[in-house]
Amino acid sequence: MERISIPDLAERIPDNYSAYLFLEEMRWPEGPLCPHCGHVGANYIKPREGTARATRTGNPSQRRLWQCKKCRRQFSAMTGTIFHGSKVPLRTWLLVVFEMCASKNGMAAREIQRKYAVAPKTAWFMAHRIREAMRTRAPGALIGTIVADETWIGGDPTNKHGGSAPARARREGVQIKPGEMGTIKTEKTPVLSLIDAETGEVRSRVVANVIGPTLRKVIAEQVNMGRSVLWTDDAAAYGTIGREFLSHSSVNHLQGEYERDGITTNRAEGYFGQLKRSINGTYHHVSEEHLPRYLAEFDFRYSTSDLSDTQRMARLMGQVEDRRISYKRLVW
């Protein structure tokens, strides 16, 4: 698909009928695919007059409807996707999706509300549905040179009354043993990121703490350790984990070492810098409950940084199916 910009997209989909044509082109390049039985091939059900058809409430709709040639069930390009059941016009959905794919720093719900004249709750719900689609399901194990590093997301605990958790522990006379710093309760949320140094793919996960057993469990779920090389900083937690890799190399940040013979964790540091600048500048606050979806959003854009905005949107359209989430599930 040719590269397009927001003005190009707005001109290409002036109404919902055109938006359906555009969505069908992106989702079904080989023809309509039935979401019920998976059969390729369907008959288009033409409206009685023009491009609009009457809904069960009597209101006109420009939804393009298809009937599967195999199971005979009806469907549209929105059926079973993050757009399913939404009262927001499809044209609005596509414009918001494109902006979230193209915006390096993300797009706040309040910005969606102002630009597209939707309710605040609707804008927030739309953004989380798109983030859910950005999350990669059942990914294969990473193989190759893996950069692993951790960071903490949240406000500076020293700005709160009583200071940071380690500071309170020292003040109260609690002895902190070496390697146990990651077990101390803090207001910040620890995040582990794994980056494939060759492909640039990143996978970030919220973790309970940054001690060895916790990190190893996450790494083992995402990486083929016996066929990969591990690059980390000098954190003691990676010492035992590294023995399960083909090799383990680290750089000592405490001694001012950030690169040695090509070994570095700078890719992870760069990713964390972008993530934190965007959270602070665009979202301002992210709860621990919803943080995994925000991580999926930034993982998706970082992992597809070599694609154009249009190609990134097309990639996302291949992931919108079976990603329906309810508003109640998000708030309860």
Image: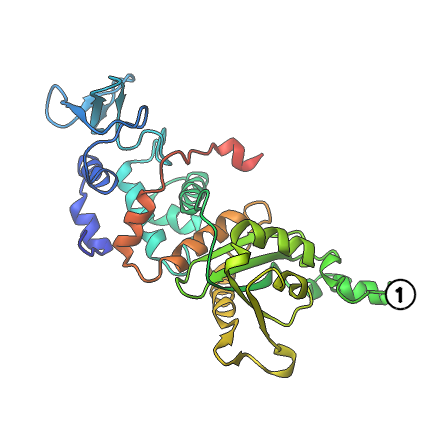
- Give the camera-side residue of 196 and 109: 196
Q: Is residue 181 left or right of residue 267?
A: right
Check disc 1: other Cα within 10 Å, few if <14, some if 14-19, many if 20+: few
Q: Which residue is mark 1?
A: 173
- Give the camera-side residue of 288 and 148: 148
Q: Is residue 130 above or below residue 45?
A: below
Q: Is residue 268 left or right of residue 67?
A: right
Furthest-right residue in view?
A: 173
Q: Is residue 121 left or right of residue 7?
A: right
* Image location (x, y in percent) of residue 139: 45, 47
* Image location (x, y in percent) of residue 2: 17, 54
Q: Is residue 255 above or below residue 304?
A: below
* Image location (x, y in percent) of residue 285: 55, 54
Furthest-bottom residue in view?
A: 256
Q: Is residue 153 left or right of residue 278?
A: right
Q: Quadrant of residue 158?
A: bottom right
Secondary element at image label 1:
loop
Q: Quadrant of residue 254?
A: bottom right
Q: Amino acid at mark 1?
A: Gly
Quadrant of the snapshot with the C terminus: top right
Q: Quadrant of residue 163?
A: bottom right
